[in-house]
Structures are given as structure tokens and as C-alpha cells.
Amino acid sequence: MAAGRAGFAVDPYNGGMADSTIEADALIVGAGPCGLFQVFELGLLGIRAHVVDSMRVVGGQCAELYPDKPIYDIPGIPEISAQGLIDNLMRQIAPFEPELYLGEEVRTLEPVDGGFDVETSAGTRFRARTVFIAGGVGSFQPRRMRLDGIEVHEGESLHYKVRDPKKFEGQSVAILGGGDSALDWVVALAPVVDSITLVHRRTEYRAAPATVEQMKALASAGKVTEVFGKATAYRETDGRLSGLEIKTLDGEVVGVDCDSVLVFWGLAPKLGPIADWSLDLNRKTVNVDTERFETNIPGVYAIGDINFYPGKKKLILSGFHEAALAAFAAKEHLEPDKKARLQYTTTSPLMHERLGVTPDG
């Protein structure tokens, strides 16, 4: 894979000002699953992509928030972890040699003749003929606890993501939240931890019904304790977080002993600089059409969770579909005198050449 500011062959944290403007037929903003699949769909049409992401690793939310969370709705793959999906996508796009620029936020996008002038927070400058916004929910951070001084425990006994479930083996764990991530981790950690207390501010959960049923079964078996209320204080023992105080729905204050606190209150999405690009916005999303997934600016496309259209579903597989149609639209934008030809990957000469295989396999 080609070495860009953060290509696979170079230091992914290399920063500094770019020496000159980089010419790009396609610039993808966002290296989550949809952004990576956009590389593949463009590659099938002979368009090489450059990819910029504010995170220092590829994968977006999949890598940052729930790398071990199982995903079940990728066609042809009954079950795969979020990180496993990203790893597979990286292998899939390798033949098309994209250039990756990680740890850089795209700050400005200015229309010019023949494309767009784009500059990142690291000073990297692009002249891009087409731009694909695949930024998920935009620039995001987990919603954090707002208890005075608790941030000093972050990464030790306070966590907003799980990278290594084995870290919690034999511990008493408090999990805060009532959505999919919170209940998924209740179910996943129940077999390895000593005890789990699930704290949620209301009695109804927002997670998938099947996951709620699994959690309720664990509670009935005495493996999970449900507490409905809000954390109002925390306790320390020998400088380590050792418990929470919860104000319950009926006003009682109860103590929860724990070795670790896992907080899954969702993300605080921010469009960031995207909000200043003269795009047609719908709250914190970008309006697109459903034929080309093009924004109100010709040559700028938006795919994945960042876009909006009637009937929009925020699913990875929907983003993959959007990437395919956006790639064909971009091909026609780049070569208006030619009709983009559909190539099936089983018969694509480009794929055979890239992968070094013969047409008969």
C-alpha cells in the first residue's frame, strides 16, 4: 500500500507541514468502515483514493469504541468483531494502494476550478477533484462523567471503551448506560467478571430486545444487579476508584462497590469544520440525493452516518451501498464524456491484475 503521511509503510504519527499540494482524484474524509469501502468501490473504477482521518488509527467508531463487539449484519459473514471487519477491509483495499493521512483533521474545503482546495490540521494540502465525506457522526468523543476529579482515574479504573476484556477478569464492575454498547458489554463480560452492577437512569432500555432479554436472564440468575438512578459521587481507596454513590429514582442514595467503572452514554457528535463548508445541513447531518449520494456541492459526496435522506438507516451495510453509488457518480463527474461501466469483481480485469490471478481463478 502506498505510503502517504500515514501509509502502511511509514510512521502513522508523522506530522508537519506538507511540502507541496497533493493532487488527488478522490479525497475521502473519514477512515471508518464506510470510508474504507469507498476506497474499494473507487478502486474498481480505476480511481485511486487519498484518505484523511482525525483519529490516529483506521476504523472509526468500530476501532475506537467497540473493537471486540460482534457484528451480525454484514452479508455473507454470520459474525465478525468490529476490529475484524476493519482488518478485512484493510486487506480488501490493499490492492488499490490508497494513501492514508491519520491524526489529521480536515479544516478547510474551498471550491476552485477543477475541484477543491483542502487543508488539514497538520498543514497537508490537497487539490482534490472529488471529495467524499465519510466522517460517521463527525468528530466525536464519548460522553464523560461530570464528577469533580474523577477524570484522574480514566484509563485505569474508569473506562469509556473496552480494548481488552481480560483486563476485567475477576473484578466487580459497574456499567453505566442503557443502550446497545452498555448491554452488549454486560452480556460479554458476565462470564469473566466477579459481578456486574448495571446503572441506568430509567427502567426502560434502548438496546436491541434480544440483548435486553439476555441481560434480564443474567439478572434473574443473580449475575447482574440492576440499579435505576444517577451516579452522584464516587469513592476512592488508596488512590483508586472503588465505588459509586447512586441516587435512585425514588430518591434513595445507595452505594455500589466496584473495581472498575465502564461508561457507555453514547457519543457527543460534532460536525466540526464540516459545518463551515457551505453544505446543505440537516441538524448534524448532510443532505444528499439517493441516486448519487451527492451533496448540494457538485463533486462532494457524503456516505454513512454523516448523511441524511428520506428513509435513512444508520447501518454499515447501508453505507456500503451508498459508497458504491457514490463511486459511480464520481466516475461520471471525473469523466463526463464516458459512461461508467459496471464491472463485476469476478470478471474485472483490474481486480485480476491487482490480485495477480487469472480470470478462471
Image: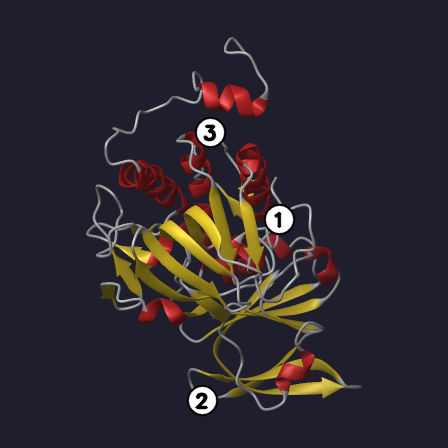
Q: Would you call the spot at circle 1 few (<14 residues within 10 Å), some (14-19), or many (20 or more)?
A: some
Q: Image point 39% across, 70% down: which residue? A: 273
> Is the N terminus in the top left, top right, bottom left or bottom right quadrant?
top right
Q: Image point 25% across, 28% down: which residue? A: 339
Q: Which residue is the extreme one toward the bottom? A: 148
User: Do the residues under discs 2 and 1 have CB atoms within 8 angstroms?
Assistant: no
Q: Nearer the viewer, residue 11 or 140?
A: 11
The residue singled out by tag 1 in the image is 7
Q: Would you call the spot at circle 3 few (<14 residues within 10 Å), some (14-19), or many (20 or more)?
A: few
Which label is found at residue 76? Answer: 3
Left or right of 288 in this view: 141: right
Which label is found at residue 205? Answer: none
Mark-to-mark CA distance, 3 and 2? 49 Å
| 247 up-or-down from 26: above or below | below
Q: Which amino acid type corresponds to the residue marked 1 in the rendered image? A: Gly
The residue singled out by tag 2 in the image is 251
Q: Quadrant of residue 295?
A: bottom left
